């Protein structure tokens, strides 16, 4: 028989073990951690209870009630969405702020350039300019309408400007004759042969067209990037994702380990499963970023709208001087082709040519370049956005890694044996999955239906694809018009509303095979200033059609 002393010793050992076991099951630490997290649970067990009521966490002995697990699930959804929002905040705010800066800069540049031309032409040409100022006002109105997404064909619009200017100048320089609308229409037939303004219209058309295509497309690109970033970062989480996040972040509470953080690879598998659709955006996103960087290079170089627009008053004045210097030759050739117009009365013929444009435009001074109110220059804006865009490559595929950084969510790589692996404290053994929806078929943490891609994400992929195509064309100086695939405007209405109109041609080369559609025009149109025929670079058939359409408008 066992001695009394042996029985007493055995009882003491069992008592110590029982006290140790009781201490391990104590839930006081869980209660304190829950309070610190802001949970106001009506009841937290003092010690572990059977977990048969649990649906997400392990059903063994637990410190969690059904209410606690439900609240943990709600909090997990909020934590996950807040984390995505936080991680994408810089991306979203950058696109919002840079779109605003570029848009404001381009609009202010247009306003400053128009004001500068008006002031200088008023001083130089005086009354003849004031009487024909609407020709220049219409030019800037159409340029602004194009930039803000209007249905404007730049080449046709610029041809119309030079045609109207020729009509007004020919009438002024030949004030001793009666110039009728029919006669002006005849002049328009010889515009390309006469080249009354020298080579200025051809050069300026190429520069203005390319610069405006690049500027408008770049701002549209910033708008699309902004919309995509905002929409993708707000994609709602699936129930399977929330279960996985709850298990990762809060099931340690139920196991009396509230201070143990998830293993990094465990977190990566959870986030790759939850963000599988976002990761699929990355290939198109990266191509879009590359295309934006290409157009940014153009904005710094040959398609710099600032360097094109600021001296435009000098270039137009140069064309006016060429027309004035060659007025006798131009008039002679027009009279040969269109006949001698009827003489005017004494009151008109008494005015000499010197009274029309009796001064030359003063030389262009680079020191007098118009500047924006903010003091920005295009070069500074482009350098800034290029650096930002480079940082945003592979953003969506890198998002799980950014979310699973040490201290923010996980225990980090240094604590592989001291982290939560989804079941207990210890090393996480499953392999980290690759990025994208199809690679989640065997994700051990998140059940992902790879046969059902997220519709909103697919829409954003298409929006990026369309925008990338437009950017690549803009890089080559070509314009492609399309209906905005984001299904809504940018909010500012500048440079981001895309409508289905005709393509712009560069030096007679078609930018795209989309059929040409004549753009409508706004602003006052004087009946004495008919629209001109297109340049010789356009097909003869289009020229004849344009003339027929002009007659209808008259």
Image (tube, helix red, strand yellow):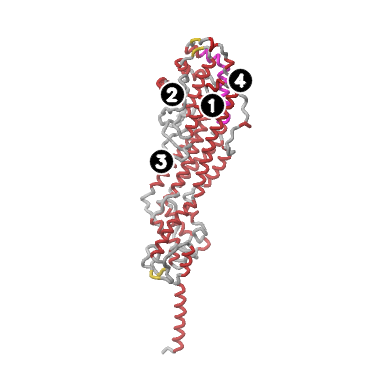
Magenta stretch: dominant SS? helix
The crowd level at tag 4 (other Cα within 10 Å; few <14, some 14-19, many 20+) is few
The residue labelled by disc 1 is: 203
The residue labelled by disc 2 is: 539
The crowd level at tag 1 (other Cα within 10 Å; few <14, some 14-19, many 20+) is few
Query: Distance of mark 2 from mark 4, alpha carbons?
Result: 39 Å
Residue 32: image x %, image y %?
48, 67
The crowd level at tag 3 (other Cα within 10 Å; few <14, some 14-19, many 20+) is few
Query: Distance of mark 3 from mark 4, alpha carbons?
Result: 52 Å
Q: Is residue 399 left or right of residue 55?
A: right
Callouts 3 and 1 close, C-beta under 8 Å: no
Q: Earlier in the sequence, mark 3 or mark 1?
A: 1
Q: Earlier in the sequence, mark 2 or mark 4?
A: 4
Q: Secondary structure at mark 2?
A: loop
At horizontal 42% and vertical 66% (from top left) the residue drawn is 42
Q: Earlier in the sequence, mark 1 or mark 2?
A: 1
Residue 98: image x %, image y %?
52, 42
Q: Which residues are magenta?
A: 308-333
Q: Which mark is residue 487?
A: 3
Query: Distance of mark 1 from mark 2, alpha carbons?
Result: 20 Å
**Name of the residue lying farthest toward the front:** 347
Whether residue 532 appears in this view of the structure is no
The residue labelled by disc 4 is: 359
Image position of 316 with respect to 300: above or below: above
Residue 209: image x %, image y %?
50, 30
Q: Earlier in the sequence, mark 3 or mark 4?
A: 4
Q: Secondary structure at mark 1?
A: helix
Q: Which quadrant of the rendered structure holds the C terminus?
A: top left
Q: Per the image, is 516 magenta?
A: no
Image position of 82 with respect to 549: above or below: below
At horizontal 45% and vertical 20% (from top left) the residue drawn is 527
């Amino acid at each position: 028989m066992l001695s009394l002393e042996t029985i007493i010793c055995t009882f003491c050992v069992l008592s110590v073990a029982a006290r140790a076991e009781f201490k391990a099951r104590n839930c006081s630490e869980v209660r304190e951690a829950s309070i610190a997290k802001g949970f106001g649970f009506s009841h937290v067990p003092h010690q572990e209870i059977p977990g048969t009521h649990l649906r997400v966490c392990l059903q063994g002995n637990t410190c969690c009630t059904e209410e606690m697990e439900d609240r943990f699930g709600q909090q997990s959804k909020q934590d996950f969405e807040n984390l995505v929002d936080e991680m994408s905040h810089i991306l979203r705010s950058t696109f919002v702020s840079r779109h605003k800066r570029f848009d404001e800069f381009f609009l202010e540049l247009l306003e400053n350039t128009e004001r500068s031309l008006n002031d200088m032409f008023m001083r130089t040409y005086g009354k003849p300019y004031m009487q024909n100022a609407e020709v220049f006002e219409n030019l800037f109105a159409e340029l602004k309408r194009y930039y803000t997404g209007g249905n404007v064909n730049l080449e046709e619009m610029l041809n119309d400007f030079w045609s109207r200017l020729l009509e007004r100048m020919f009438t002024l320089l030949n004030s001793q004759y009666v110039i009728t609308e029919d006669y002006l229409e005849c002049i328009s037939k010889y515009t390309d042969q006469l080249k009354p303004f020298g080579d200025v219209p051809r050069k300026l058309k190429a520069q203005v067209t390319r610069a405006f295509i690049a500027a408008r497309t770049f701002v549209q690109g910033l708008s699309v990037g902004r919309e995509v970033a905002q929409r993708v970062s707000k994609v709602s989480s699936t129930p399977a994702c929330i279960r996985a996040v709850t298990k990762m972040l809060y099931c340690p509470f139920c196991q009396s380990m509230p201070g143990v953080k998830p293993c990094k690879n465990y977190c990566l598998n959870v986030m790759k499963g939850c963000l599988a659709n976002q990761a699929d955006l990355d290939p198109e996103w990266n191509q879009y970023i590359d295309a934006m960087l290409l157009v940014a290079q153009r904005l710094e170089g040959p398609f710099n709208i600032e360097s094109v627009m600021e001296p435009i008053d000098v270039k137009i004045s140069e064309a006016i001087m060429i027309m004035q210097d060659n007025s006798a030759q131009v008039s002679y050739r027009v009279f040969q082709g269109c006949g001698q117009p009827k003489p005017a009365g004494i009151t008109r013929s008494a005015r000499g040519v010197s009274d029309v444009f009796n001064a030359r435009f003063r030389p262009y001074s680079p020191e007098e370049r118009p500047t924006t109110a903010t003091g920005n220059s295009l070069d500074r804006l482009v350098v800034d956005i290029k650096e930002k865009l480079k940082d945003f490559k592979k953003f969506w595929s890198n998002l799980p890694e950014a979310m699973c950084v040490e201290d923010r969510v996980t225990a980090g790589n240094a604590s592989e044996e001291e982290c939560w692996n989804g079941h207990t404290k210890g090393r996480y053994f499953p392999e980290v999955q690759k990025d994208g929806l199809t690679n989640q078929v065997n994700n051990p943490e998140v059940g992902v239906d790879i046969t059902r891609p997220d519709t909103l994400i697919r829409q954003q992929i298409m929006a990026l694809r369309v925008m990338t195509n437009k950017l690549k064309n803009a890089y080559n100086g070509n314009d492609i018009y399309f209906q905005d695939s984001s299904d809504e405007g940018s909010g500012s209405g500048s440079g981001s509303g895309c409508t289905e109109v005709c393509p712009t041609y560069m030096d007679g080369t078609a930018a795209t095979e989309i059929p040409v559609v004549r753009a409508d025009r706004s602003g006052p149109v004087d009946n004495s200033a008919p629209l001109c025929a297109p340049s010789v670079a356009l097909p003869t058939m289009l020229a004849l059609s344009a003339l027929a359409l002009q007659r209808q408008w008259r």
